Image (cartoon, grey):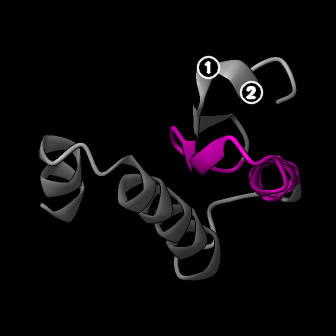
Amino acid sequence: MLAVENLKKNNILSFGKLLYLSHYGLRDLYEVSCPELDFIVDEGKKIKGVMGGRMTGAGFGGCTLHLIKEEDVEEF
């Protein structure tokens, strides 16, 4: 619900923070992430235009989803 509210209000920064929190929950509480996905999410945080990121899919490897400003996609 909070994610939907943030999107409806165009509060992209708060939505991005929720993506990170979701990743940390999947990593720490459910232990379904892996070092490679954690690395990608953590490295993304170092780029100013990356507003959020998390693993996606069934876990134990796979993909990440990132919310990135268009002008920072190339750096990512």
Q: Nearer the viewer, residue 22 or 29?
A: 22
Question: Which kind of residue does numbered mark 1 sit on?
Answer: Glu
Say whether marks 1 and 2 touch (CB < 8 Å).
yes
The image position of residue 76, as x and y in percent, is 82, 30
Q: Nearer the viewer, residue 50 or 2?
A: 50
The image position of residue 67, as x and y in percent, is 54, 37
At x 53% / y 82%, what residue is drawn?
29
According to the image, label 1 marks what residue? Answer: 70
Magenta residue span: 36-60
According to the image, label 2 marks what residue? Answer: 72
At x 76% / y 56%, what residue is drawn?
45
At x 75% / y 48%, what residue is drawn?
48
Quarter placement of the N terminus: bottom left
- Residue at the far bottom in the pictured view: 29
Report whether 69 appears left or right of 10: right
Give residue 13's quadrant in the image. bottom left
**Mark 2 surroundings within 10 Å by alpha-carbon count, few (fewer than 14), some (14 through 19), many (20 or more):** few
Question: Which kind of residue does numbered mark 2 sit on?
Answer: Asp
